[in-house]
Image (cartoon, grey):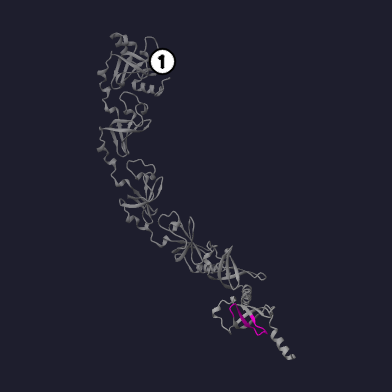
Amino acid sequence: MNQQMQELLAKSFRDYKEGSIVKGRILEIRPREVLVDIGYKSEGVIPLSEFDDMEDLQVGDEVEVLLVRLENDEGMVILSKEKAAYKQNWDKIVKVFQGGGLIKGKVKAVVKGGLTVNIGVEAFLPGSQIDIIPPKDLQQFVGNTYDFKIVKINDDRKNVVLSRRELIEQERAEKRAHFLESVKVGDIVRGTVKNLTDFGAFIDLDGMDGLLHITDMTWGRLGHPSELLKVGQELDVIVLDINKEKERVSLGLKQTQKNPWEETEGRFPIGTKIKGKITNLVPYGAFVEIEEGVEGLIHVSELSWTKRITRPSDVLTIGQEVEAVVLGVNKEEQKISLGVRQLEPNPWDEIEHKYPIGKQVKGVVRNMTAYGAFVELEEGIDGMIHVSDMSWTRKINHPSEMLKKGDEVEAVVIDIDKNAQRISLGVKQLDEDPWKVIDQRYKIGDLVKGKVTKLASFGAFVQLADDIDGLVHISQLSEERVEKVKDVLKVGQEVEARVIKVDKTERRIGLSIKAANYSEDDLRKETEAFDSIRPGEDLVGLEQAFQAAEEEYRPGDRKK
């Protein structure tokens, strides 16, 4: 071979370095490999599997390939189309990375910690770099193509780490700046519900987050934002406030609709019957939605004329449909007062016709106080028997001396106070007052028998027939001087005495034990002596004597 020929060959081979990319032409397509001429002394071979478009391959096509080995044991040139593409891509990736640019890529699969992306080479996209808020479902990204920023390259291991989040953040910052410049208070903007909290919803206004507070969602009642909105929902909202420094926007939804309270006074005049649904029950009443955004309150006292309702929840349930009457409207405070009992006539309006004075009634003792007993005449209507109306003759200190809870009693209506909704009853009025005919029953000089009921410092009370009490003054116990009544008498003792005084107006009978065996003359003297006891002395009329006895002796206290 002459020198010229050798120089020519050397010149043509000098570009054939292993690892370099060269151009070649397809010579032959075999079942498992493709023969390629790269202008070298022997052909190169590429596995057919490296060609994506095997069907379209034709002899004569030009391809870029990587020279893997110039000659193997069989003298063949080993080429790779895939490695050529990889090298070209890698060089491009390095350039993009150095220039801080963006690269397109297709998400291939979900792997531990993130996604794999094909950008010409396989790259890794960590979960935290997919979006501003790391998504829960990564599968939704597979198969999609996005723009990425290259954040890390390892040349030796050919590793690439991508980020999509940085691009989104940058884009959002630009959009946010544009929004804050272009939008003003009062504008209506379209947004998407991003997430919900107990106090409101965050609305994505194409890059800008706005807060829609729960109180600005609806004119009506709302327990939680999720009752009205859901994540991903699109809606029109009004801009209520913009804080450019803090990049905060307050939004309103209810302000895009008419305030239903504007015309409530005209639409719900006092006395109007309405229908509504119970939305909330509280100890003092029930809230009723009359229409969307308008609620009224039925106070617990307006539920019934007569029933004693302690809690609205005892008679009503949430969601129940009710009828009511408008009692008042306050537009400023957005309050409507409602009543249920006004649907029925007030039984107290007709009470004097149903329970006229003098009428005999029956009822059950429902409750007792120190001064009397409450008797239920019908559901919700009670009458009260005062202790002073329980007996003509006995001094009743507590109603329990005569009655107990649950007893059925007969009584007479003695008074009605409609305004205070009170009916006064009397038990003693069922019978004639025995004191009216006392002078026919007991005459001076009559010998009587009775039982000692109470002892006092000034004498003793003796119970006669018809529950009438007579008083034996200390001076009438014995001929001898008595220091203490209890030395002579004890409670429960049977005694015989003579009537020495009958006073119809003061309702008192004077008795004398020592005069039981007197003659008429002695008796007259004793009566005069008894009459001469004046209020300044030991005895003050029977009323005061009773009172004094009551102070010293409480009911049931027999020890003194």
Whether residue 52 sits left or right of residue 422 in the image: it is: right
Image spot of residue 209 (x, y percent): 50, 63
Amino acid at pointer 1? Lys
Q: Is residue 36 magenta?
A: yes
Q: In the depicted view, which residue is nearer to us: 71 or 553?
A: 71
User: Can you see residue 70?
Assistant: no
Q: Give the total number of marks visible in the rendering.
A: 1
Up-down relation of residue 388 to residue 104 (above or below) = above
**Element on which disc 1 rests:** helix
Image spot of residue 50 (x, y percent): 59, 76
Q: Which residue is mark 1?
A: 486
**Quadrant in the picture for residue 522:** top left
Image spot of residue 427 (x, y percent): 30, 29
Up-down relation of residue 418 to residue 432 (above or below) = below
Q: Residue at x 41, y 54 (%)?
A: 221
Q: Is residue 304 magenta?
A: no
Whether residue 79 sits left or right of residue 476 in the image: it is: right
**Which region is colored magenta?**
30-44
Image spot of residue 62 (x, y percent): 59, 83
Q: In the depicted view, which residue is nearer to us: 116 or 199?
A: 116
Whether residue 157 sits left or right of residue 321 in the image: it is: right
Q: In the depicted view, which residue is nearer to us: 301 or 108?
A: 108
Pointer 1 local density, CA inside 10 Å: few below 14, some 14–19, many at least 20: some
User: Can you see residue 2?
Assistant: yes
Up-down relation of residue 381 to residue 2 (above or below) = above
| Quadrant placement of the C terminus | top left
